[in-house]
Amino acid sequence: MKFDRPATQNPIDRLKVVGQPLDRIDGPLKTTGTAPYAYEHHDVVADAAYGWTIGAGIAIGRITRMDLAEAERAPGVIAIVTADNAGLLGKGDHNTVRLLGGPDVQHYHQAVALVIAESFEQARAAAGLVKIDYAAEPGVFDLTAAKGSAIAPEPNELTGPVDTRIGDFAAAFAEAPVTLDATYTTPDHSHAMMEPHATLAAWEGDRLTVWTSNQMIAWATADLAKTLGIAPENVRVVSPFIGGGFGGKLFLRADVLLAALGARAARRPVKVALQRPLIANNTTHRPATIQRIRIGARRDGTITAIGHESWSGDQPGGGLETAVSQTRLLYAGANRMTAMRLAELHLPEGNAMRAPGEAPGMMALEIAMDEVAEKLEIDPVEFRIINDTSVDPENPERPFSARALAECLRQGAERFGWNRRDPRPGRTRDGRWLIGMGVAAAFRNNLLITSGARVRLDGTGQVTVETDMTDIGTGSYTIIAQTAAEMMGVPVERVTVRLGDSDFPVSAGSGGQFGANNSTAGVYAACVKLREEIARRLGFNSEAAEFENGEVRSGNRAMPIAAAAAEGDIVAEDKIEYGDLSERYQQSTFGGHFVEVGVDIATGEARIRRMLAVCAAGRILNPKSARSQVIGAMTMGAGAALMEELAVDTRRGFFVNHDLAGYEVPVHADIPHQDVIFVDETDPMSSPMKAKGVGELGICGVAAAVANAVYNATGVRVRDYPITLDKYL
Ligand code: MOS
């Protein structure tokens, strides 16, 4: 189905099932421990051997000797996979560095061996007997030091242009009566998902099946085939349940490749879960950024010049953290410049994490906005509204499909009691706590991506949806069931949803908050076809036919839809395709984040007291799962503000705090009170669902709102995340 003009009225608009706050249909499976995760598919594979991954002990250099003899003789050991015996391996399109290193080593904890044994304990014990000598080489590990040699990389589809220039930024900035020129830094972040990267692999002749934990099934399938040098049709990837991804499971990772190689070497199924202490350095992370922001404004609050430059680093061949993307779209201003530069670093591979680009970009931009508002003596909510725009500021021909930024900020201010905030910092006390309130805009793009699905009706009236869409804890199963139920006019219990299997039609997958709108739109398209076929078989005019209460009806005539499948299942498959729709309209999601903090007057410890997010993200398909997405994202924003940081050992080139004890994330006690409001919005340009993404909107801006609240509490402006108490000094 081609969707390239504004949506008209359609069956989803009935909102009998879609838009309702249904509990997750996969909830009971998860709370009873019966949802099988990658490492747990005992139901299909009973005799798996266990793999233990060995990560390189240097950041860059060569393995000069690897002695496996003692390990091979250890009890229970079946095989040891290394680059020496793995055969010729390729590299997937979405990977920057090789997933199995050796003899040359590209980053610390790059996998260099997999020890396979009868038991997990035997594999672990034997791994301790593998002796590896290295010749380390000097590498570059410090972004600050490497910044000077950063270059403008080739632009690509994901990063957009590297530089943009509108008007005369330098002249406008020089003339502006009020200016800010400040530099902000964000650290490397780790996804820190609950479920480690894990895979169970089994070969049947030339055919490989992997049960894994992956957000993007089609990418994983293609990349695994390419890496192994086998035909994609001989690879099946299955990932029905995922214990958190956050971008860390967008791409094929070492566990998948090692399990596949291990199963081939052991001649039996093998399972591999990356050990927790390996994950931070073996897998990807969000790269640190250095961001310089310059804003010039007139006394009335109008921005006349806005400039944002960002530096990040990655492995040779890697990509940018696109921290300036939101600055190209969020505020008006006639004279503009943005630039992104990439330094070559030999730290582990950087890549997407929790709203890549906008999340760290908003961490800087939205402090800068607070700083300018203060210089102007204009309320920071008002300052943002003054600079609102209804068109793409870099391309005024292109309107936003919907843009409720001002409404979100106004509603949020009202609901949060913003008028109780004293704009003078350090004036509000509650016992030993200095109290502050902060605001930030929320902004995240909405991407339109082709997405397919297959729906089947059987003779009992049960509808089954199959798509390779994944549910990373987001609620995909539920909103897809709601969509099919609405379209087919059946209760949600009459819909079975099967996800995360490369045997199913290719969907948008889970990432970039594009999953919900696109995957349900793909299901919508397949359901339109199924409705047509049912109508045809039962002799209804499909234009006039209505589907309700398990029946298709038109005028006085009604028949159960199950009757259409009396002779055998009816199967319909389709995908949603958007043409150039997202070039004609800028599609984004907007919001306002409000935070109140207390800062201990003696210790400087900052505690969040309450948070509010107001979100405009098109139609909300399920307010309960959407709210859960947003409060989770707000929690991640709080982590980014106050605690999350991978500490770089700049001599040896690795992340030191590589486990959940050293890499701090918020716990319940850190987040006392959260509120989420969805403003009433349907976006007819986003898809027939009229929905957009909302999950990542929830994180973009939060950290700056916390930072601005800390400033309001203390009068100390911290521009270097995370805001730990040493930084007030
Ligand atoms: Mo998200 S970082 O695109 O999984």
Image (tube, rainbow, N blue to C red):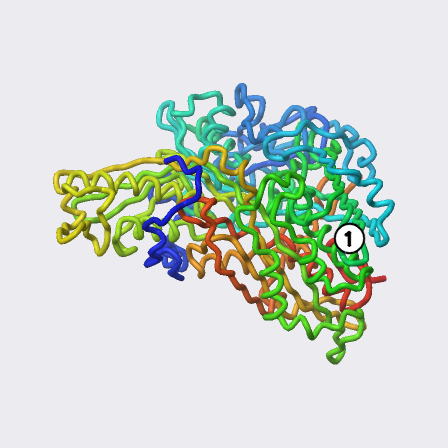
Q: On the rendered structure, is 136 left or right of 171? A: left
Q: Is mark 1 on a helix, strand or loop?
A: loop
Rendered position, 376 above or below 213? below
Residue 575 in picture, x, y percent from top left: 37, 36
Q: How many neighbours does mark 1 have within 10 angstroms: few (below 14), some (14-19), or many (20 or more)?
A: some
Residue 662 visible, this orientation? no
Which residue: 37% across, 59% down? 28
Residue 301 visible, this orientation? yes
Rendered position, 713 above or below 557? below
Residue nearest the viewer, comparing 92 with 59:
92
Tell me how many marks there are.
Answer: 1
Question: In this view, which residue lies farthest toward the bottom?
Answer: 431
Which residue: 85% across, 62% down? 729
Say which amino acid is labelled 1: Asp
| Residue topped by disc 1 | 720
Residue 387 in picture, x, y percent from top left: 69, 53
Residue 169 in picture, x, y percent from top left: 79, 40
Residue nearest the viewer, comparing 440 with 83:
440
Residue 162, picture quadrant? top right
Rendered position, 590 above or below 526? below
Q: On the rendered structure, is 710 left or right of 397? A: right
Residue 143, picture quadrant? top right
